[in-house]
Image (cartoon, rainbow, N blue to C red):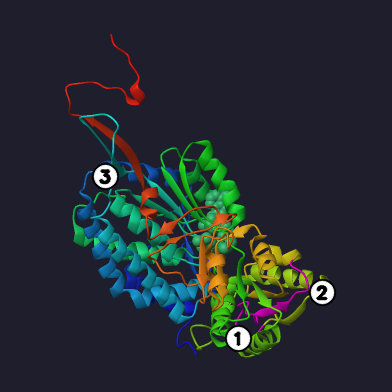
Amino acid sequence: MLTKPLSAITKNTMQACGVTADLDHDGGMQVVSPVTGEVVATLAVDDAAATEAAIGKARAAFRDWRMVPAPRRGELVRLFAEELRKSKEDLGRMVSIEAGKSPSEGLGEVQEMIDICDFAVGLSRQLYGLTIATERPGHRMMETWHPLGVVGIITAFNFPCAPWCWNSALALVCGDPVIWKPSEKTPLTALACQAVLDRALARFGDAPEGLSQVLVGGPEVGETLVESENVALISATGSTRMGRIVGPKVAARFGKCILELGGNNAGIVCPSADMDMALRAIAFGAMGTAGQRCTTMRRLFVHESVYDQIVPALVKAYGSVTVGNPLETSALVGPLIDKAAFDGMGAALEEAKALGGTVHGGTRADVEGNGYYVHPALVEMPVHDGPVLRETFAPILYVMKYADFDTVLEDHNAVGGGLSSSIFTTDLREMETFLSARGSDCGIANVNIGTSGAEIGGAFGGEKETGGGRESGSDAWRAYMRRATNTINYSRELPLAQGVVFDI
Ligand code: NAD
């Protein structure tokens, strides 16, 4: 049992992070914890004028920050990582309170922030351009990378802080100020992260004001950022529905955009799979975070020769998984974010039943309080159709039998989402085919691990309706900078490219 009301724990935790904002703003936006359904804070909302003012401040900050040497910018991120380490427990608790994650997943999300900061510090000394062979004698050609401008970061409820940090750690070392519009369901974690960054800024000393700001509010705040010509890059994480609105608006003003949208991720269990390993990976991938990860496994194709071996074992795991309050118990499955998510899950299961699906689990779990807790659902589907073809943001795993490897690859790719995918096999030919040009069409393709739980070192993102954006590791930093191709003539002649003659 919690010894204090959740709202009191929330306020203590926010205070420990250094947040000074009014958390009981009269008539403000209510923040509801999915853990108990309690209102844990009410916050003042930033209107369009406040958003424009924030953009103005960030623009002014850009003029100074772009001139600070990149390794010095990296020093700020290094200090931020130190402060994050000090506040890891508190920030992890805020993630659990606002998003309903288990303590280990809440802490894991904060660890992801620390990891990307460490990555960005190294990156601050590696913002390399190419030197390119030129066809003209006495010339040199090269690429240089420069800071881009203000970066607007819009994030989803299910990862209340890590995606912001994937963006902001890179943007800051690349020379860009950031403005964060977190989900209206999880603004407290955002305020807490900003307070932790403010501590690093104070230690850093001479960073310009407005380098990192948080705006509280709903889609309308995001829209002001999206439509502003003064925001050079919009990085938006959320549903495909949101991306369909945001993408064209940014394109219409020739802004840059990173879209990190919904997925419909699948796994394939082949005859040669290590069944015990596959079982554990599928259980975490499909039920972890109550099915509320963009990378959650939503579809599973099982070869007919091993179907009766693995599916009953999975059904058993679904029946025994613990569901409960993540702050009070060691339950592996916490709450859904709200009633709309619960209703959406129920509707998808009804649709699946009408198509002949057999549903295991999927009922509401009896947990004290007003949270929406469910037993994860495994649905044996006779067809790859209906709700299987779209993302329902809840713990539903649709399981289908397959006979032929080439056909299953086609079914695997026959959905809108293109985020993450897995194959479970020890057969080299199947493994390499899955990773080849005719294999998985997703941005993430894994072998013998689940679809979720990516590391920061790789570029993260997906194709098709997932939006095509890449964040985090590898060369994702390039999106936060502008590229210039420079050609220098150090000869006494003026040869033109392609042999063109223009003698005057
Ligand atoms: P959502 O689309 O409802 O909201 C996401 C964010 O977009 C919120 O901050 C919201 O206020 C803002 N927003 C909504 N409409 C907007 C508009 N017209 N203009 C500007 N901003 C707008 O998503 P959600 O329910 O918070 O999150 C769940 C979804 O996010 C799922 O589809 C999940 O797959 C996806 N997601 C994707 C990734 C990824 O990296 N690909 C990561 C996390 C979540």
Alpha carbons under labels 3 and 2: distance apart: 59 Å
Expressed as whole percent of the image width and height from the top left, the position of residue 218 reads 53, 55
Labelled disc at residue 314: none
Reading the chain from its start, which is encountered first: label 1 or label 3?
3
Q: Nearer the viewer, residue 235 or 277?
A: 277
The image quadrant where one finds the C terminus is top left
Question: Foreground mark, 2 or 1?
Answer: 2
Amino acid of disc 2: Gly
Figure quadrant, ligand 1:
bottom right
Q: Is residue 8 visible?
A: no
Disc 2 C-beta below 8 A from ligand 1: no
Q: Is 219 rendered above or below residue 283? A: above
**Which residue shows up at 40% across the image and 77% down it?**
107
To which residue does mark 3 refer? Answer: 66
Above or below — where is 285 with respect to 212?
below
Q: Hey, what amino acid is under mark 3? A: Arg
The magenta segment = 365-384
| Kind of residue at disc 1 | Glu
State the SS at label 2. loop
Of circles 3 and 2, the one toward us is: 2
- Label 2 crowd (10 A; few <14 / some 14-19 / many >=20): some
Q: Is residue 362 magenta?
A: no
Q: Which residue is mark 2?
A: 356
> Could you tell me residue 267's position as x and y percent?
60, 72
